[in-house]
Image (cartoon, rainbow, N blue to C red):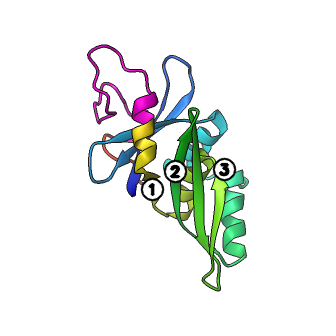
């Protein structure tokens, strides 16, 4: 089973200095943190802020290529979590209606989803696996939830970021 999510926050991990994307279930307060690379975080941040670089970035190029060949991105799905590595797929249809699926890193899939205005989904098992793999401090709950002090927004206003 998959749940639809929105980007809730893009922030820096205070311990490692690594960017984190916080995905929030659109139907509940469940959140999923995904650590990403600096380049991908920058690509996501630029699109969230609607800043157009002078030349197309890699994700813009991919979007343009998909459109040029007559295909459409229908959705992206974070499909798996293995050994602390997230996996995703980009689901598309070509002009003849044939379904195509591309393996992707979640950060690249999310950057493309923002550029193509398609929904983002997460497999429920990924959320469960993430909750079990995260170290829990004494007194903390095991579920990642919408605690504003725990997950402050770095980009955007309080609430879900626009997509």
Question: Which secondary structure dominates the residues rendered in magenta?
Answer: loop
Residue located 50% across and 63% down the image: 117
Secondary structure beneath dot 2 equals strand
In three-dimensional space, the C-alpha distance between marks 1 and 3, rounded to whole angstroms, equals: 27 Å
In magenta stretch: residue 93 = no
Q: Would you name the residue on which mark 1 appears?
A: 121
Q: Secondary structure at mark 1?
A: strand
Residue 46: image location, x then y, percent: 57, 46
Residue 9 in view (yes/no): no
Single out the mark in the foreground, 2 or 3.
Answer: 2
**Where 88 sits versus 138, above or below?**
below
Badge 2 density bin: few <14, some 14–19, many ≥20, Cα 10 Å: many
Taking the spot 30% from the left edge, 25% from the top edge, the residue there is 149
Of callouts 1 and 3, which one flags the residue occurring earlier in the amino acid sequence?
Answer: 3
Question: Quadrant location of the C terminus?
Answer: bottom left
Q: Is residue 68 above or below residue 154?
A: below
Q: Nearer the viewer, mark 1 or mark 3?
A: 1
Instruction: State yes or no: discs 1 and 3 in contact (Cβ < 8 Å).
Output: no
Mark number displayed over residue 53:
3
Does 148 lie within the magenta span?
A: yes
- Dot 2 and dot 1 residues touching (CB under 8 Å): yes
Q: Nearer the viewer, residue 107 or 44?
A: 107
Badge 3 density bin: few <14, some 14–19, many ≥20, Cα 10 Å: few
Q: Which residue is mark 2?
A: 78
Residue for point 58% across, 65% down: 91
Q: What mark, if any, has residue 162 been given in the picture?
A: none
Q: Position of residue 27 (x, y in %)?
A: 27, 53
First to last magenta residue range: 130-156
Residue at left 40%, top 49%?
124
Tell me whether the residue at label 2 lies in contact with that at label 3, contact meaning CB atoms closer than 8 angstroms.
no
- Percent across and percent down for residue 67 are 66, 72
Q: Nearer the viewer, residue 103 or 61?
A: 103
């Amino acid at each position: 089973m998959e749940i639809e999510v929105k980007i809730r926050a893009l922030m820096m991990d205070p311990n490692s200095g690594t960017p984190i994307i916080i995905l929030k279930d659109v139907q509940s307060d469940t959140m999923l943190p995904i650590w990403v690379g600096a380049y991908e975080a920058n690509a996501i941040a630029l699109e969230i802020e609607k800043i157009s670089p002078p030349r197309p970035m890699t994700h813009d190029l991919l979007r343009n290529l998909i459109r040029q060949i007559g295909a459409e991105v229908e959705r992206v799905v974070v499909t798996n979590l293995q050994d602390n590595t997230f996996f995703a797929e980009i689901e598309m249809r070509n002009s003849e209606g044939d379904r195509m699926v591309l393996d992707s890193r979640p950060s690249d899939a999310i950057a493309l989803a923002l550029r193509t205005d398609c929904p983002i989904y997460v497999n429920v098992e990924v959320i469960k696996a993430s909750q079990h793999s995260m170290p829990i401090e004494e007194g903390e709950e095991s579920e990642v939830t919408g605690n504003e002090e725990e997950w402050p927004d770095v980009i955007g206003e309080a609430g879900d970021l626009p997509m």
